[in-house]
Each structure stands twice: as C-alpha cells, then as structure tokens.
Image (tube, grey):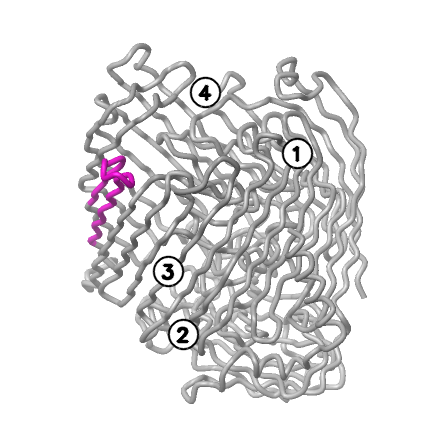
Amino acid sequence: MGVLKNFTSTVLLLCTCFPLSAAQSQRAAAPSRSPLARIAGAVRVEHSPRLDGTLGDPLWQQAQPITDFRQREPREGQPATEPTEVRILYTRNEIYFGIVCRDSTAHSLVAAQLRRDVTQELDDYFEIIIDSRHDRRNAYVFQLNPLGTQRDALITDELAGDTQDGDPGWDGIWTSETRTTENGWTATIQIPFSTLNFMRSHDVVWGINFKRFIRHKNEEDLWSAWRRTFGAAKISQAGELHGITDIGSGRLFVFKPYGLVGFRHLPPNAGENGLTPGTSPLYTGGLDIKLGIRSNLVANLTGNTDFADADVDVQQFNLTPYPLFFPEKRQFFLENAGVFAFPLSIDENADQLFFSRQIGIDPVTGQEVPINGGAKITGSFGGLELGAMDVDTRSSGINPYANYAVLRLKRSLGRSGSYLGVMGVDKRSGNTIDRYNQTSGADGRWVFFRDLILSGFAAQTRSPGFSSGQTDLGAAMRFRSNWLDFEAERRKIGPNFNPEVGFLERTDCVCDLADANFKVRPGFAHVRELNFESFIFHAPDTHGSVQTQEWQATFRANFHNGSYTDDDIVDVFTQRLTTPFNIYKNVFIPTGVYNWTRHQLTYGSAQDRNFTWSLFERFGGYYNGSLNEARVRAMYRPSERLTLSLSQQWNRFRLPIADGNFSVVFGALETDHAFSRFLSLSTVLQIDTANTQGASANIRLRWNYRPDSDLYIIYTAGQQFVSLAAANPVQLYQNRFLVKYTYSFHP
C-alpha cells in the first residue's frame, strides 16, 4: 500500500510540475492516423450558436455538414435509408454539434423515455462518440432521443454495455435541446471541453464517430465503423476530427457536498450482525471533489461517502452452488470504472481481478460498510492509461476497518486497440485472522486483422496461511465475422487463489470453453438473421476430477421488427458437489455427481411498440429430479412520462430429497414516472418467497434542479444491496427513509 501511495504522489507531482501539452500527450499515446480514416472538420466561431434545438442560427451554416452515413443493420455498408447531417462548431471553451435527422415518416418516430441515463434502446436516438485521448480504445458517449433525454457513458477497451454503447456510470455536464418537425427531428448539443477534461491545446486530433438508430425500422446507421462486426464501440475504427486549435478551457473542478437526514428501523435479529435493533435517526454529510490534473487525467476525492441514491439490486434466485454477479451501482466507483477492469474470463460480467462492490458492502449480508474516504486518479499520462485508488472503511457490526489500494496501468500497442497492462490490489484490515490480501496480475490484448482478438493474463494472490496454489493463468481468442463468431478460452485456477477484492465464481479448476455461433441472413420475409450456436464448458479440478461440464445447442431467429426467438435445443449438464448445496431455506442437496438435461423456449415481441414482452420456459432434469422455470417480462410505455416494467419467475422443484417438492416465486414491478427531464419518481416492488420477509420496496424521487445537483427523497423496505454469497442466505430486513441533498459547484 505504501508503494502505491508513493507512486500516486509521484504521478501527481510529475503531472503538476512537468505537464505535457495535450497535443504532445496525443502524439505520445497514439500513432499517426490511418490513411483510410474518415475526416470531419470543426469550425471556430467567436460566440456560441443559438442552442434551441434547431439549426436556424446562421452560424451553423459556416460548418460543412457531415453526411454519408452507412447502415450497419440491416444492410451492411448500404447508404442509410433516411438522411442525417452533423455540423460541428467550437469556441475557446466549448464544442457544439448541430444534428438533423430526417425521416420520411416522421409520425413513426418512437420516443418514450424522459428519465436521464436509462437505456434508450426502444427509442429513436442519436449518439456522439468522442475519443479525446485518441488512444483508439476508449471514448465518451453522448446520446439523446427526440425528447432531448440525455444518456452519457464511457466506452473502455472497445466494450459495449449490456444493451447499449458504454457504461452509463459516468456523468458529464452538457446541455442539449431537440425539436420534432414534419420532416424528422433536430438537436443542438453543447459540450464544455472541461467535461472531457481537455485543457489548452493546439492542432487537436480526436477520434470521433456518430450513430443514429431508427427504431421503427430497427435500423442502425453509422458514419464510420459500420461493419456488422464493428459498431460504435469499435473505437479503433472511428473517424477523426480535425480543426480544433487554440482552445483554453479551464481546469475541470467540481466541488459537491451532500447532506442527509432520515431514520432507519432494524429488526430484533440485527444484533446477530453487530447492529442495534430498533429505530434510530440518520443524519450525516460528506463531500465529493472532481479535479482535472491535466488533460485526460482526473482525480476523484470522496469523504464520508453515502450511497443512499444508488439503485437497488433486482433480486435473483441462485440455482447454482456458485455466487451470482451483481453489478456495481454506486457513483464514486462507477465513474471511470473501466480503467480498473481486469477480466479473468471472456464474459466481462463474470470473474474480475478487481470488483469494487467488495468495498463498502458486506458480501454476505449486503449491509453497507461506512466509508471514511477515498481517492482515485484515472486517465492517461505520457502514453500510459492510469488508474489508482485508495479507499478506507471503518468498523461496522461484524466488519472490521479496512483499507483498499488499487493500481492499474495499461499501454496501448499501435492503433488497433491492443494493449499490455498490469494491476495490483492491496487490502489491509483489522481482522486478526485475515489481516491482508494482496493481488497482482499482468494482462494483454492483441488485435489482428480487426476481427481476431487474442488475450491472456497471469494473476497471483497472497493470503495468510497459504504458500502455494494461489495463481490464475488464462488465455483466450475471439473471432468475429458476418457468418461466424467463435471464442475459446483456457484457465487454470489454483485451489487457494483468493482475490478478496475481486469476483471469482470458482477455484481449483482447469476451465476450458469453446463457443461457435453460425449466422445466416436468409432473406425470408421478416427474418433478419438465423443463429445456430453450440458451446462446451469442461471444468475439472487441478487433479483431473470433473467438477462441472456443460454442452449446449441453441437456435435463434431475429426478425426485422426486433422480435426474436431463443431456444436451447438441448443443454446437457454434469455437476459434482463436494459439500451439500443449500438450495432453499433448510433444503440441502447432498454431495455427489449429478447429470441432467434441460431445454429452453423463449420468444420476445416486436420492440417498436409501446407494449413489449417476452416469455421464457426452461424445463427438464435438475439434481436427479426436475425443475421447471417459467418467466414473463413485460414493459408498457403509455406515454413519454410513464414506464411500467414487470419481471416474474416461477421455479417449480421436484427433488428426490426430504422437503424437495417446493416452489419459489420471485420478481419485480418497476415504475418510472417522469414529470419532466429533471424530475422523476421511480419505484421497485419485489417479491421473493424464498425469504421469510418476501416483499420489499424502494421508492425514489429525484429532482435534478441544476446540472449535477440533486434532491432525493428515498424510502426502502427490505435490502438495497443483495448478498454475493454462493448460497441464498436470508438477508437483514430494514426500513429506511432518507432525504439527501447535493449541490455541485463548478466554474
């Protein structure tokens, strides 16, 4: 930990005393542009154009329009069916985008989302992707729909999000207005250079791309990287923006205090976790600071951090003897989180060498652990991508105090998106049995011919009482083409490998995975693509005894209107239990080797409607018995102000053990009511019959009364964060009512 702090201090000193210019940094971090790159130009103006959602201001006519958008879907490389134009202006401190999205059937525009930062995949939308570092791997995303609803995100190492481009955990300060017309819709956007943490520079070259999605046609149009295997997240294939020079943006500085008042009620069994039962008042305050050290390098500081405004976890029932992955939801850890990513598997939502959710949340009870303070530095410096973090937590209940230090470095290799990286994590705690846990690793990614990616890593942990078996080695390949997606990986995980500040599904494993997905575009009426996929997962322990084995054959059909079917023809499973598996309350599945076969049927409706739904049915064997999983999901958007979402699942178990015939029902009803783009009320009502307290609720009113400043009123009955334990433990039920006020000071 001392080494990390000394290194961080050195970086800060170098950045402050010996800063490179932004242009020098870009030359150090990225090679010269590709001769095939698309080039866009920005025009200098002396004052801001009128930002009313139209391009009526004569200043916009000074910029050359960017056109020639091409289809990625449905007809790769063909001209977009609807014209799109983008004009770019800039002043000394801001950059401006004027956008025209024409539509021959403007009455077919789909826009029903007013709440900021939620997915807009069911709407028409336009997206700007800016690679201000020009490292060809990472970028900012600015997205809006015809209602002017904003979503911003970060793309890291060319990875898209679960449903749309980038991780929406990053929040930037920018303004936008839109107008719908009889010919489509238009938009104006203003982005301060300070939002991109981009300071004084000359002759700037950025990576840039634009994406338009036309919902009623299910059509995706891009200015660059329109190949089906690329997309907006393929930053290495973006175009370039030239023409910006002599800018003098002020240093990024955001000073954001908060105050919180309310009460909490805990049940009598709270004492078992070292907490005080009964009702108690809550009143506290804290501070977050964001500081631009230099272009593309930013520091985040937090004191007495509170996470009351984080979204609640949607509960799941664990059908495996391994822990479930629940994503991070807290703003301090989400911002620039991709810098710290060190995936240990092809699946980026699976094993991770560093998983910030292990800080400040008890992994078994889901209870919050108070954070005294933390600091992190993220960005690029001298051709390196840097992430450094130090967080300190205090004792709470059964959790002793702890300190977490994290360091991540990556070096870009050429302009293809390849890199080499290293990472170190150091945890120190007041637990006399587990005083420390250290993790280190090195990884790399190499991109060949734009479609073939090879990756590999080596990681090691150090924990008290162990001297061997603490390594994890892995290598993988991924190939993408219009007719075949293929990926394979091999990992060897030691029996004592233990990244306590990471996420790990299993240890003591030689894990092999191969997956092939054949894709066909048959040209049938309404059918866009057919998929025939098969994979095999073979996971013996390091002594050769099979622990898990699965092979599966799947058929999918995707239709032009967004509907789909996803069917597992066969799913053959083998599982060895070395300890009894607590599947439900007091029901334990005994140790032994189990074999079963399952099947799955899924259908999802068209996605261009106000009402969308999907049905899921999985049935067959399960641990020498049977299991039927029936699931329904539905979303209804009667207007742009109201969204209703339902997800419900019924699991019916028939197991040949004592009390083995039972059912578990769980699900959630979510509502979002947007009074405007800046005031919204969201509720999450959940039920889980596997828990004694089966019902829970979260109600949250958010008023974004000025940029990056909010008033929250929150009521929670139940658990905000769920357990990461492998079993399905009963969690501590609580009632909380909170009022939280934040105010963001920024130049």
Helix, strand or loop at label 1? It is loop
User: Which quarter of the rendering shows the C terminus?
Assistant: bottom right
Query: Which residue type does callout 3 highlight?
Result: Gly
Helix, strand or loop at label 3? It is strand
| Disc nearer the start of the sequence (2/1) | 2
> Residue 738, how many percent across, how many down?
73, 33
What number is the disc on residue 225? 2
Helix, strand or loop at label 4? It is loop
| Quarter assignment of residue 455 | bottom left
Q: Residue, x 22% and y 56% (percent of image)? A: 516
| Disc nearer the start of the sequence (4/2) | 2
Q: Is residue 285 above or below residue 189?
A: above
**Residues in magenta?**
532-552
Circles 4 and 2, Cβ within 8 Å, touching? The answer is no
| Disc nearer the start of the sequence (3/4) | 3
What number is the disc on residue 430? 1
